[in-house]
Every structure is written in C-alpha cells, then in structure tokens.
Image (cartoon, rainbow, N blue to C red):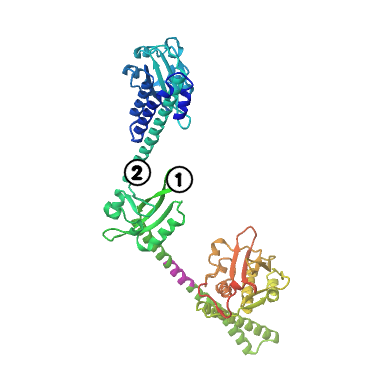
Amino acid sequence: MLREFDRSASLGEGPGTEAMPQLLVHHAQVLEMMAEGAPLRPVLDAVTGALEDLLPGTKCSVLLLDERSGRLHHGAAPSMPQKYIEMIDGMDTGPCAGSCGTAAYTAVPVVVPDIQRSALWDDFRPAAAIAGVRACWSTPIPGKDGQVLGTFAVYYDTPHTPTEYERHLVERFTHLAAVAIDHDRLFGSLAQSEERFRRAFDDNAAGMALLGLDGRVLRVNRALCALLRREASDLVGRYFQDLVEAEDRASLLHGVAAEPDDRHRFELRFRRLDDEPIVTSTTYSGVRDAYGNIASWCVNLVDETDRKAAEEERRARAEAEIAQRHAEENSRTKSQFMTALGHEIRTPLHAVVGFGEMLRSGNLTPERSAEALERMSSAARHLVDLVDDLSDVAAIEARALRLQAEPVPVGPLLADVHGLLATAADEASVTFDAELPEGAPAVIGDERRLRQVLLNLATNAIKYNHPGGRVVLSTARADGDRLSLVVTDDGPGIPRHLQHRLFVPFDRLGAERGKNPGSGLGLHVTKGLVDGMGGELAIESGGPAPGAVARVTLPTPGDTASRPPRDRPAPRDV
C-alpha cells in the first residue's frame, strides 16, 4: 500500500516522497492502536487527525453507515464543532444528501468544490455555515465484502478542488479507516460471540465441560460441579475419561476416536464424590478454529439417573406381567391340550373297543367284519401317529432327536409325497400337483424326517383349502447354494392375528379356522425338524396372492458352510 502511495504521489502535486516518513509514522500509530484493542472512536480520531496533519488547513470526518436504518452516524470529527456533529448525526443517505449522504448512496466519491453553489448541500448549508466550511469531498469506505461501511470526508474553509496528490492521500486513509472499521466489527462480533458462549456455558442448566484435544478438562460450569458434587479445582486439569466409570471408558474413547469430525452421544456412568452412582446422557461436540479444524471438545451432560431407574422399573414390571401372562396362557393351553389329547386318544380307542366287541359277537357279515377291521386299523394308526408326535416333541425339547444328514434327491421325494396324498386331495376335491425339478437336485437332510415335514405341510394345505382349490409342490433357488421346497395353496390363507401362533405347541388353530383341529403339535414338530436339519421354515400369507406359501429352505451338497453335522440333534429352542 505504501509503495502504491509513493508512485501515485509522484504523479500529482504536493510534497510526495517528503511526506512519506510522517505518513509511515501515522500508519504505524493507528495499527498499534488496533493491535492493542483500542475502541473504534479513538482509532478513527487518530486516522482523521493524521490526515489533517498531512493536509494543513483541512478538517476531516468519518461517518458510519447503519445497515438497518440506512442512516449515517458520527464516527470521528476531531476538528468540527459539536453543533455541526449533532446536526448531521443520523442523516439519511440519498441522491441529493450532501457530499457524505450522496457518496454513501452512490458508492462513488462525491466532490463539491463550492458548497454555496451545490444543490447537494441545499438542506445542509446551515450546518456548513456553523462549521465555517466552503468545500467538501467525501469518499465511501468499502468493506471487505464490497458493502459501504461509511464515508471519509475532507473539508476546506474556502472553495477548493482536490489535487491528484490529495485524492491519493485521502484514498490511503480511507483504506486505513476501512481496515479499522472491519477490525472493530470482527473483534466486536468475536467479543459478543465469546460473551454469548460464556453465558450459555456458565449459566447452562446442563453440566458442561470444555476439553482439550488430549481429553484434559480445561473449563467446567457450575451445573457440572453440582452434578458431580465436586469443586471446579478438582475437575480442571484431569482427563475426562478418568471421571467416567471404568466399564464405559473403552466405548467413550473408541467412539470419539473412530469419527472425530462427528457429533457423538453416549450414555455414561459417573460416581459422585460421595461415591453415589449417576447415569448421564453425554454429548461431545467439536469446537472448530478459523481453519475448520477441531480445536477442543464441548461436552454436555444431562442427569438421566432418575429416568433410567424409572425406565428399568417399568421394564421389569412389564416383563413380569408378560411372564405372568405367558405362564397363565401356557397353563390354559396345556389344559386345553390335555383335554384335546384325551379326546384324541379316547375317540380311536372307543372305535377299537366298539368294533372289537362287534367282531367278538360273531354277528357281522364278512363285509362288515372287513370294514370293522379297517376302522380298527385306522384308529390304531392314528394313535401311533399321536404317540409319535408326542415322542418327537419330547425329543426336540430334550435335544435328543437324532437326525441323519445326507444328500436327499428332491425329485423322488416330491413324487413320493404327491403319491401319498393324492387320494386325500381327491376326497377333498382339491387339485394336488407336483412340479418336479429337472436334474433331480439334492438337499442335505434326513430323508424320513424331510418326508414327514412335507407331508405335514401339504396335508395342512389340502385340509384348509376350499373345494376346487389347488396345492402345488415345487422348488426354488434360495440365497447361496441353498434350495427351497415350496408348498403353495390358493385357499383362504392364514389370518394375520393367528400367524404369530403357527409354531406354538399345543395351540390348536384349526378350531379358529373353522376346521376340525388336530393335536396342535404338527407345525411345532415340523419346525423343530427343519431347524434340526440346519434349514429354515417360513410360512407366508396375506400378500397380493391368495392362500399361503410354506418354504423349507435347506443346504445343498455344494453349500458346505451351512451343512449340519451328521447325527445332529434338533435344537431345544424351536
């Protein structure tokens, strides 16, 4: 800037380089005042006073623009009468508002060689007469963002047109005034920001601490001292993580170090000075410097001890109530099961006893005798199946059900199941199809148990279908090297309010679906068998398509990662 002044001074009139030492002294004085944090008014007085020294016979002033009102207010005028200052303080800007008001409005310098002859001064000639000035030129003071901050004016007692030297000299001091105003606004904003932060920090109801990047406590507020029941001197200088309970320190340090640019929230436990434990919701927020780097951490702590205790009490109460309801429901279900089981056993036993008495009487024809024997045989098979189901449930619960894991060809298995249930499907007027896969892929499982699974699922699909309905056995590729055996029906489906009970033992859903219920063990046993073979059983209903879809997904010989070991016992939790 000084080199520019030297070159420009040599172009016009005036002392030029002879004024340079004095100019440097004035600049240095003003910059020292700003560096020491002097208020804006004394700094602007020094700027205007310096120009008056360099341009003898002049009077200088600075007016500051209020952006909200658009008015100019007194900034500095060390040589102007107080009356003049009061008359122009708060003046409007506009296209015909004296030299200063017009310069601030147009953002370009305004030169008035003779105030008495200028229309710009029509409203301000009385003020000029009080000040005893006849010429004035005003230069807008630009901020760093290009907006006008105010005006720098030079007055003469006689009509005068500024020389090139005077223009360049005023330009330099206008720039110096702009630096001073920007500096004051910046540091004023910083001071206001620091004051707001101090109030928000010290007076905050939540406990707050300011930490260095190494985790040491730099500052704490009164609320944190009250929360931890410690003096500030006992907290400042300590590592924050040392105040946290030992079991929470690892998660705290890992969470902050993993993503240091983010805001973090933790649930941390502390111990007060009297060893009373507390639980807090703790938030870490990075405080950034002028370059955008995190310079420190602001930590906010809110006491959650009472809320957590109340929450734990509510949770424990709710769990106890749920456990009690489950116990009562299980008791009712088992009672219902025992009643149903007694009925399931008595019905075929009565058939066996009744037809046995008829055979013993010897009064039956050969045809009636054959029918009686067939009925007795059917009842006996029903009893055997019921006993088998009960045995399977007991083995599954005890993790004692042994399953053979070996490749099972899917095609023959589906064909076998289709053949066994074709007659039952015809009797129910349900179309029963098997879409046999090409290439006869295999799955890993126990062939006998897998046949039992498919028979249970397909039997249910036929039983709960409607006359004229359709049931299909098929396969589908699943994720990885796994294969799904699928039983699809187009019946009424499974109501949503019953779906969560599908695999509950002793729960006889058939009664609620308008059908003759079974023992309530079929799906429970089926899921236990599938789980024991390392597979998954899913039953879907209620989608866009009618009916239900049962999927048994099992590993294939190529899926070694999920293949179950040989003789794998079925899991207990099914």
Q: Check the image and report above or below for 476 versus 132.
A: below
Q: Quadrant of the N terminus?
A: top left
Question: In x, y percent, where is residue 271?
Answer: 31, 59
Q: Alpha-carbon distance for marks 2 and 1?
A: 22 Å
Secondary structure mostly seen in magenta is: helix
Chain-order first, disc 2 or disc 1: 2
Left or right of 481? Residue 314 is left
User: Observer-nearest residue: 188 or 414?
Assistant: 188
Q: In front of the other: label 2 or label 1?
A: 1
* Name of the residue lying farthest toward the right: 438
Residue drawn at point x = 42 percent, y = 45 percent: 289
First to last magenta residue range: 324-333
* Name of the residue lying farthest toward the top: 117
Mark 1 element type: loop
Q: Check the image and report above or below for 209 versus 27.
A: below
* Name of the residue lying farthest toward the front: 18
User: Observer-nearest residue: 568 or 559?
Assistant: 559
Q: Disc 2 designates what residue?
A: 200
Q: Quadrant of residue 326?
A: bottom left
Question: In x, y percent, where is residue 190?
Answer: 38, 38
Q: Check the image and report above or below for 107 versus 435.
A: above
Mark 2 element type: helix
* Residue 521 painted magenta: no
Question: In x, y percent, where is residue 339?
Answer: 50, 75
Q: Quadrant of residue 440?
A: bottom right
Left or right of 461? Residue 242 is left
Looking at numbered disc 1 in the image, what kind of residue is underneath it?
Gly
Residue 442 seen by the camera: yes
Graded by Cα atoms within 10 Å as few (under 14), some (14 to 19) or many (20 or more), the crowding at tag 2 reads: few
Q: Disc 1 designates what residue?
A: 292
Looking at numbered disc 2 in the image, what kind of residue is underneath it?
Ala
